[in-house]
Amino acid sequence: MTVDEPTTSEDLLPVVMGPKTGDTRAKGILINVALYAICMLGAVALASLLVILTTDASPFDVIHALYLGSLSEPAAIGRTVEQATPILIVATGLVVTSRAGVFSIGPEGQFLIGVVFTGMVIFKLGLPPVPAIVLGLIAGAVGGGLWAGIAAVLRYWRGVDVIISTLLLNFVAIEVLSFFLNKTWLLQEKVNKQVLPPQSPSLNESFRLPRITIGGFTTTSGIILALVLVALMAFLGMRTRWGFRSRMLGLNPNSAQAAGVSKVLVGGGSLVISGLFAGLAGGVWFTGVNPRVVLGSGGTMPGEGLLTALISRRNPIVIVPVALFFGALRAGGLRLAATGVPSNIVQIVQALVVLAALLPPAILHVAERRKAVKIAQRAAAAEIASQEKVEVAA
Amino acid sequence: MDSITSILAGTMRLTGPLAFSASGEYVAERGGTLNISLEGMMLSGAFFGIWASDIFNSSVAGLIGGMLAGLVVAIIHANMSHRLQANTFVVGLTLNILALGLTSYLLRVIEPRGVQADNIDIPLLHQIPLIGESLFSNRWPIYLLLIVAPLSWYMVNRTRWGLELRACGEDPGAADVTGIDVNKRRRQGLYWAGITTGLGGAYLSVAEVGLFNQNMTAGRGFLVNAAVIFGGWRLVPIIAGCFLFGGADALRLQLPALGYDIQPQLLIVAPFLLAILAMCFFAKRNVQPAGLAKPFERGVA
């Protein structure tokens, strides 16, 4: 048999994946980087084209304004960090869920419930500042965890798909917030018996998270909390039994269960943990970034946390730069008014960047599969040919 | 009496966008795509519908523009998730953000003035008490629903294409073995959802309101996802669910005017709560297509 094509699946593997020499690995990384660069440039080019076609401003004005708002001076960097903080906390929790193979799109609802819980504790319990903030943040986390817990219970008791239940619960949470902001005995602001539009009172200075100020740089101390949580979760995920079990569940639920990993405890638990984080993010956002809650509060911020976790592909370290990038876009967006370009361009850029980040791994994956199929087909053809040769000889 | 008439008429108007979209999403979900970019499709349909009606000075052009906008969103979604195998929920969420950002942006730089579709009264019938106004006196595009919904049902249940599509939704592996291009069928199902959802958005803006407001669909796309679950993946109950949700919306708008004091938030969340409740009953009965939301890739069992 003079076939130099591999015929068994074990032989196929190195051909498909490429032998793991330094050379091919470097080439792979190069292709990866090139693909990401092309896709990102494409996203920026599309957004620029939109700006050129629809406004008098040039894309460079937009980029300059974004830079001014997010990176130009210490104060701007502080704003970027501040905006990135809740995003980072939400994303940290979601890395846990996606590692366990659970996909939740509920951080928005959990975030808002977190805001409601934190607000109720701080405004209604009448505690002195420090215990109020600490208890408020804990309550926010608990609120978010409970909200996620509903989805977990529905999943493991009734078999309801998590994606659908978390999606629907987001809308319920929006109306829960609306309810609380429309009742003066709950969170609505009331000044001299005059009832104001649906919004909470502004949080008194002493009840806000302390600020970190170094020269012109000032930001919320929530970022310290966020970074500690990132490190903690990265450690727990990599170095503990629980982290191992949840990774196992995510990679292969059947074998994980056969090995004694509880789907309910580890899978449902991971969902609740992401809820705790999203709720905490709501509390941090309220006490550290935005001291007055109005309808539509938070906006797309929890969603950005979700996207951060998703494009970081379960890597707890990558989420930090990605969250900072989203924070920079938010902070920079505040400066756009001067250029005459609507600030919604920020949302467009966000979405295009995420789509661009999705493309390279998908393209590589498809290319790899095509190659594998081609090799397998050639191997099969060669095998048939050699069998025919044997038959002819006999 | 008048109040009931006006609630019923409001129900009809608010059900329209949902029912158009649900007819298409029914097709997509039977093919195995749980499509959460409906919101983006509907919002794009609403904006580009108004814009097209402004450019061509015709409401028909507006409806076509809306359908095309929905289709474009569907094409991006389908090719990213059913060709490149990117996660369909990530793609869907991102497209929603993109549609919200793009329509809000364009609204501020273009400020289109739409051309509203005409109201038609069907002779005699529209004078029937109670139901006359809601059924027989409407902006004319609503009657397109009489084509779109039966067509969706026919495509799924009475054509070869529909049989193949349902196979892709129930057991993609088996469908693949019989020679059906699973991802192609799924893409096609999604295209149809894009067209009808774009039409639903255009119906909302071009026919009912006559202009576009920022984020004017306000979660209606997700309501359609809820309606499909509520209807147990069968078209008639799905459309009934749309009427129920549209009715809750109409009540929310009408009840305060009639002097009833009811928590508006409760009426807004009612459809979502109903859908969650429906899920609790359906999930264990295997009503949903077995391959729903499971990506398919050849050669991977």
Image (spheres, coloured by chain):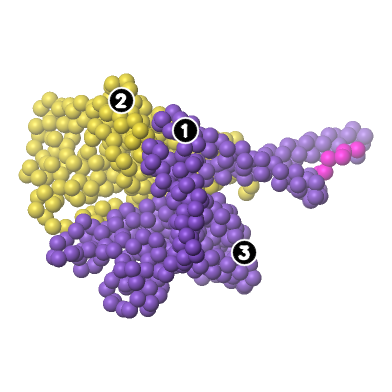
Chain colours: A purple, B yellow
Question: In the shown orientation, is residue B32 left or right of residue A249?
Answer: left
Q: Secondary structure at mark 1?
A: loop
Disc 2 crowd, CA 10 A, few/some/many (<14, 14-19, 20+)? many
Chain letter of the residue beneath label 3 in the structure image: A
Mark 1 → mark 3, Cα distance in angstroms: 50 Å
Amino acid type at circle 1 is: Ser
Residue at left offset 23%, top offset 28%? B116
* Percent of width and height locating residue B164: 50, 36
Residue B229 is one of the magenta-drawn residues: no
Q: Is residue B133 above or below residue A308?
A: above
Disc 3 crowd, CA 10 A, few/some/many (<14, 14-19, 20+)? many
Q: Earlier in the sequence, mark 1 or mark 3?
A: 1
The label nearer to you, 1 versus 3, is: 1
Q: Which residue is mark 2?
A: B53
Give whichever of B161, A376 is nearer the camera: A376
Residue extending furthest front? A215
Residue at left offset 53%, top offset 65%? A227
Q: Which residues are magenta?
A: A2-9
Snapshot quadrant of residue B214: top left
Disc 1 crowd, CA 10 A, few/some/many (<14, 14-19, 20+)? some
The label nearer to you, 1 versus 2, is: 1
Q: Which residue is mark 1?
A: A58
Amino acid type at circle 2 is: Ser
Snapshot quadrant of residue B191: top left
* Percent of width and height locating residue B102: 40, 38
| Whether label 1 touches label 2, CB < 8 Å | no
Residue at left offset 22%, top offset 38%? B13
The secondary structure that most of the magenta stretch takes on is: loop
Q: Which residue is mark 3?
A: A248
Give whichever of B102, A264 is nearer the camera: B102
